[in-house]
Amino acid sequence: MAKTYDHYNEEAVMEYLGEGLKDLKRLTRLLEWRIPCQIHFRNLNFDSYHVFYNPVQEFNRDLSIAVLSVFAKEQPQSRKGLKRSRHGSTKDGKATTGATLPNSREEGISIFEALAATGLRSVRYALEVPGVREIVANDLSYQAVESIEDNVKHNKVERIVRTSHSDASLSMYLAKSDNKLFDAVDLDPYGCPSRFLDSTVQVLEEGGLALVTATDLAVLAGNSPETCYSKYGAICLRSPACHEMALRIVLQCIESHANRYGKYIVPLLSISADFYVRVFVRIFTSPASCKQSTSKLSHVFQCVGCKCMTLHPLGVTNLREKKPPSYSLPRLPELSKCPHCDHSYQMGGPVWSGPLHDPAFITKLLELIESSSEKFNTSKRMLGMLSVAKNELLTPFFYTIDAVCSIVHCVSIPLLTFRSALSNAGFKVSETHAAPNSVKTNAPAEVIWDIVRTWVKNGHPVSEKRINESDVTKRILEAPVRHDIRFEFNADADMDTEGLVRFQVNPAPYWGPGLRAKNNLVDGCATKEAKRKANQNKNKPPTVENAEPAKTDTE
Ligand SMILES: [Zn+2]
């Protein structure tokens, strides 16, 4: 007898598939509750199905549909206002003729999905994004392309979606050599996207949109700075704000690829969610604007004792009236020892230190999602995330209160009290979408430690033993308070985001980036289940029972 599942999870789907595939509509509801398209599976068993599909990424797909819907309304208009010469340079604001835009067609946008796997995303784009003219769904795997073709036919979107069986980069280079540029390129690879970025920045129309996912957060968030440098050209640092650093490293990487062709990026939205980061950036051409890139990139200095961060830009842009800007190199400040705890610094980066989002674009996104929330199963979470992202301060990185208090071993300061103290001292505060119980502020680290010192003095003492155990705790708590710190409630610090959904509760057992398509599974692990179990606790030090040396995942 068929069972009803209120919430899908992979086990439920596997069980259902085991019963035999009788009702495609019902399976679709299980996989992605109410989506209007149907996903056709060639085989009845996930493990014998050699194509990558991750149901947990529904939020990512919903968000992409919303972003593309807003972008599709704007791109044809902005294309008209941008001029591209034969050499690729543009002059903003001048009207252009069709001849100067090699792929200029008035109706709708074109999308290239580089690693389409089941084709679910392309099918959803074709059915749900208004104003799409053409989608090319590409995959290197022949089995994946077969399944995309099935799904395209099944959902009757042959008029819009065309398949391509090729290496993604090669396919984009060939399209570029034929002058067939795309308005949007969707890159959602397993792991690191950087190998596809060179072709992506070249194949995009002027002002085109790159939708880029990176799922190798272990590398981006500080576990392996060496691997991070080899993949993204930047050193990551381990810190409570590591997910924002991951976003900024990915943006830096796209910017550096764009700069090679006289192009630069304008981020519309940069989201850290679950086990991945996803950035939506527009790419414009202007060798003159590329000179400003060094001012949008910074090295990050992190104190090894108190973990506070200082940013140092690679260059300085001096804006001048009625003249082009001039450029200079910044001087290094005295950074040999941290002024708060007397420890030394580690250097990371370079990272993107410009804005992560375009608030005007997020406002349009919010309007779209509010007016058509029935279209998206994850609309509540999208509204929650975007509302917070829209109001984030431009200051890079943030403080996590638990991490700050753990440095001096004091009782954690309530979030609203901490934010009120910053507002009362005259500084700006905001939340961040990237982590709960965190504060973005333009206050210098000295003010943060003044708040902690005052908190400890106001009835939250730290034991002598704790103070004497750590010289960092001792130095910070012994320093004098220099700012006027008051903890009374400040209305500016009340963000009123209660009830907004931002983080998902574990949706399925072993959820995460998923595994590569089965062709690439490691020998000896024939099933996903076996690989998952083999990977459990693999980085923990060996115990007596488990004396095998731990493997290091450099992927
Ligand atoms: Zn320090």
Image: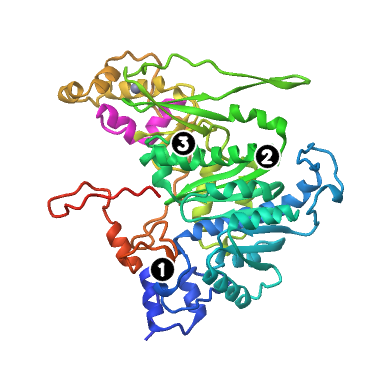
433, 13: nearer the viewer? 13
Q: Is residue 325 above or below residue 42?
A: above
Range of the magenta residues?
402-423
447, 147: nearer the viewer? 147
Residue 66 on image: x %, y %: 61, 56
126, 390: nearer the viewer? 126
Please tell me whether the stretch drawn in magenta is mainly helix, strand or loop: helix
Q: Is residue 402 above or below residue 105?
A: above
Nearer the N terminus, badge 3 or badge 1?
1
Q: CA distance from mark 2 to mark 3?
A: 45 Å
Q: Residue at x 50, y 37 (%)?
A: 233
| Amino acid identity at mark 3 | Asp
Residue 39 on image: x %, y %: 53, 73
Label 2 sits on residue:
261
Label 3 sits on residue:
494
Q: Quadrant of the N terminus?
A: bottom left
Q: Are marks 2 and 3 in contact (CB under 8 Å)?
A: no
The quarter of the rendering in which ligand 1 is drawn is top left
Element marked by disc 1: loop
Nearer the N terminus, badge 2 or badge 3?
2
